[in-house]
Image (cartoon, rainbow, N blue to C red):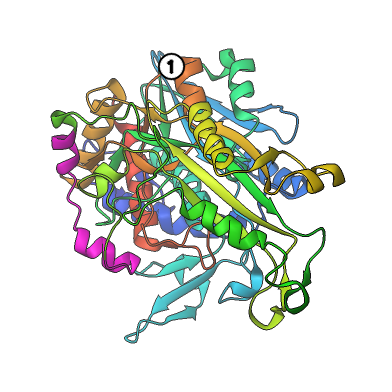
Amino acid sequence: MVIIIAAGHIFAQKNPDLDKVAAQYATQSFREFYEMLSLPNDAHFPQDIERNVQWCEQAFSKRGFATQRLNTPTVPLLLAERKVKNGKKTVLIYLQIDGQPVEPSQWQQENPWKPTLKEKDVSGNWNTISYERLYEGFDPDWRIFSRSTSDAKGPAMAFLAALDAQQSLKIQPNYNIKVIMDFEEELGSPNLPPAVLKYKTELAADMLIIYDGPRHVSNQPTLSFGARGICEITLTTFGPRVPVHSGNYGNYTPNPAMRLARLLASMKDDAGRVTIPGFYDGIVLTEEEKAILKQVPDNEIEIRKFLGIAKADDIGNNFQESLQYPTLNIRGMDALFIGKDARTLIPATATAEIDIRLVPGSDPGRLIGLVKNHVQENGYYLIDREPTEEERMQYERIASFKSNFSYAAFQTSFNSEPGIWLNKAMIKAFGKEPIKIRMMGGSIPISPFVTTLNIPAVSVPTVNADNNQHAENENIRVGNYADAVKTFLAILIEKL
């Protein structure tokens, strides 16, 4: 039983009503959430990131945390720490604060950084309603639209609200808390690995929890015990020195876009499998692992309906198995113009941006090398710049190949200390076992912590799967936000 007094504080009883407490403090946090979301956070603009760093410093300081900037060559990481009396364990929590770039004209609202509350009508349209309605209560199916609502300021603000709720309950964690905030995650966290090594003492902990990512597509409480890593390739093919008229020079001047299309198509078969020899080498799922993956309650008909596809690629026997293999993805292509800007030209260059998602056992250098060798075997002279005049006259096919490795995959046992502890907290919060995901499809920069600090890591995803992260009209379902507050509160008061 809980008692709410006039001042709005909740005093602890032995078994607090987590739903009621979480709903109250979620409601109280919506003003602060509006402030946080209103700060542009594209890491390409360090001056904007500085305002986010300052906001986070103030938010954690007023909740009793000591904050410290961990400086890097660009923008800092922010470490917040709060100790408890006789705390024998230390939990490190990872939060992402930066967001993807935006194209304001593609958003169905005034500004991507002006949080907008919407509700869906019977026709399935999202209609704007007053944000202030959240201050009195909420419909769990309302959604807040703004950049980084789900990825990942929503979880960060929900954690702050959970800290407020925990303080009101007067139930102190029996472990010390460190929070590391990353302001360059959407850039691939380029400065994180050396920073973790440099600040190893400051970051020392017994385990890492990641408050990021979407729940299982069923929107049931979820724990994730691994995530894929990522590396990138930029591949450019060259044609004429400058774009030329397709009538005057067509059938004579090779088209780099056509050549790039053929080259990319040669990397996969019709079933979606990478055809480059050795790409999947070393990735073998045991029968035990396959059985664990089958326990995830995926409805693949619903997943395909959600995606709008008739048939999935043929990699693994099901959705979860497909996530256990490295990917080769074309994430962007560019040659010349399309739509109303289209012109009758042969482009001078064509470029493809490629990402490779890594799994445990993947060697990024080896996979990048396999792709590079494949390009060379298709007759291309490889460089990492514009070709010289001499090279243009000497080589029939020229391509620029640039690559970058961001971070590796990680994986933690279901029966690890954080796995068992978090599972208990989730059961207390929701009255049932959470769905356990062996490997998330997305990538988060966690492997530097796991390898450098030698600690296990588990993700606690809370946001709705259909949140449009990285795209226009990103949103968070208000019911998921309240559940995130409840989840993080349950973890705060669960003894370790």
**Residue 374 at least partly seen:** yes
Q: Is residue 436 magenta?
A: no
- Report the residue at 74% width, 34% height from top: 74
Tell whether 109 sits left or right of 144: right
Dot 1 amino acid type? Lys
**Residue 148 at least partly seen:** no
Residue position for label 1? 85
Q: Residues within 10 Å of mark 1 (few under 14, many from 20)?
A: few
Q: Nearer the viewer, residue 59 or 212?
A: 212
Q: Nearer the viewer, residue 332 or 272?
A: 272
Q: Position of residue 156 (x, y in %)?
A: 50, 45
Instruction: Say which quadrant the C terminus sits in.
Output: top left
- Report the residue at 34% width, 65% height from top: 307
What secondary structure is the stretch in magenta mostly built from?
helix
Q: Which residues are magenta?
A: 290-310
Question: Above or below — where is 205 with respect to 141?
Answer: above
Question: Above or below — where is 171 with respect to 141?
Answer: above
Q: Position of residue 474 (x, y in %)?
A: 50, 63
- Report the residue at 49% width, 71% height from top: 117
Q: Quadrant of residue 217?
A: bottom left
Q: Position of residue 494 (x, y in %)?
A: 29, 30
Q: Position of residue 29 (x, y in %)?
A: 49, 54
Q: Nearer the viewer, residue 348 or 307?
A: 348
Tell whether 200 sits left or right of 266: right
Tell whether 405 sits left or right of 168: right
Q: Secondary structure at mark 1?
A: loop
Q: Nearer the viewer, residue 397 or 202?
A: 397
> Residue furthest toward the right?
389
Question: Above or below — where is 376 with respect to 315?
Answer: above
